[in-house]
Amino acid sequence: MIITEEQVLAALRNVEDPDLKKDLVTLHMIKDLKIEDRTVAFTLELTTPACPMKEMLKNACINAIKHFVAADAVIELNITSRVTKPLDTTQLKAIKNIILVSSGKGGVGKSTVSSNLAVTLAADGAKVGLIDADIYGPSVPIMFDLVGAKPSARETEDGKTLILPIEKYGIKLLSLGFFADPDQPVPWRGPMASNAIKQLFNDADWGELDYLIVDLPPGTGDIHITISQSFPIAGAVIVTTPQQVALADTRKGLAMFRMPGINIPVLGVIENMSYFTPEELPNNKYYIFGKDGGKALATQFEVPFLGEIPLVQGITAAGDKGQPIALDQESPLCAAFSEIAGKIAQQISINNVQTANC
């Protein structure tokens, strides 16, 4: 029996993306279909390189063709990705998705989470940028071993000067820490700080990015509002620790994104410092800051709980050395950040498709 393109596409219509609730053919995720004798070759184009279900979808495609078309078919399946973006991209058109990492309280690990999410998404093949918007306490220069580094600039044909982000670990980086003396305070009023942050978006040569992660300062102040109202934001990730004093402030930070005039999707909650695990006792968990506070917060606001990050000495040491822990493939934290990054990318894809269908 000859295998035809119509038969293969009909079989693949039985494979549904569990998030987008449509089959792969309708979603235009099947590309470059070629059939030669008993060999069926095609590309499965996902909506993000960090898709947590890529192996499941791959196996489902293979099984569908063998079941509905020919059991002896030889299937050559290549997986690529094309990151989706929201419809509202009137500014920064080459940047597909801007992700805010926020919390109402300082010291909960927003910079650690931002850095490791950026590293993880880049390792998956995405084009990633990271803005350190914590103007009064920038951490990116330390976490990427770039203290004292200075970005260069280039002139455009129309005479505009663009800042060139510094690249490291496959990520394009900008921080106000690159432009200030690390030992000097930044005594700027709100409008001055907001204008400086907008320059990191508008006056930088970011090129094409799948994800631009923004490490926000603590609180719910001018910088949060400026960024939220000035640029098309794909969503916000909320970072908290389990203890009640952190959760009280984080609730306010999360609620801010749902206020009229801001109205940014909350992609989910990450609980940092969930428990302490000594290196010599890797199977022990000590809930020194309380337990399940992040889960309770996610449940209260009906948003996804993205995962737990344990408190281990390695994560602090890695940040201080300028090598985010997610770079270490053997660290269990690498797997934890990979799972969280996949959930975030997954949620963005769902939101973008739903927006496009509205």
Image (tube, grey):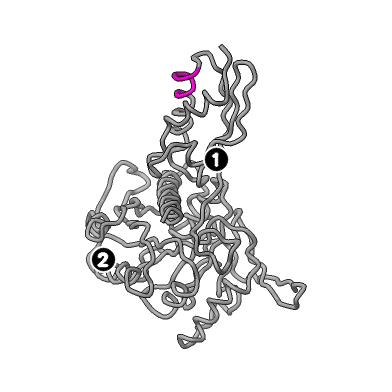
Q: Nearer the viewer, residue 19 or 282?
A: 19
Counting the numbered discs, the total is 2
Q: Residues within 10 Å of mark 2 (few under 14, many from 20)?
A: many
Q: Is residue 225 above or below residue 48?
A: below
| Residue 78 location (% of width, % of height) | 58, 33
Kind of residue indicated by mark 1 = Glu
Residue 254, quarter of picture: bottom left
- Screen quadrant of the N terminus: top right
Side of 167 where 211 appears, left or right: left
| Span shown in magenta | 63-69
Q: Nearer the viewer, residue 19 or 131?
A: 19
In the rendered structure, does residue 70 fall within the stretch colored magenta? no
Q: Residue at x 26, y 66 (%)?
A: 247
Residue at which label 2 appears: 247
Q: Residue at x 57, y 40 (%)?
A: 80
Classify mark 2: helix, strand or loop: helix
Q: Residue furthest right?
A: 157
Kind of residue indicated by mark 2 = Leu
Is most of the magenta stretch helix, strand or loop? helix
Residue at which label 1 appears: 45
Q: Residue 253: tell me if it is visible.
A: yes
| Residue 63 location (% of width, % of height) | 45, 23
Classify mark 1: helix, strand or loop: strand
| Residue 276 location (% of width, % of height) | 31, 52
How far is the residue under mark 2 from the one under mark 1?
39 Å
Q: Is residue 225 above or below residue 10?
A: below
Q: Is residue 52 above or below residue 321?
A: above
| Residue 129 location (% of width, % of height) | 56, 60
Q: Earlier in the sequence, mark 2 or mark 1?
A: 1
- Screen quadrant of the C terminus: bottom left
Q: Residues within 10 Å of mark 1 (few under 14, many from 20)?
A: many
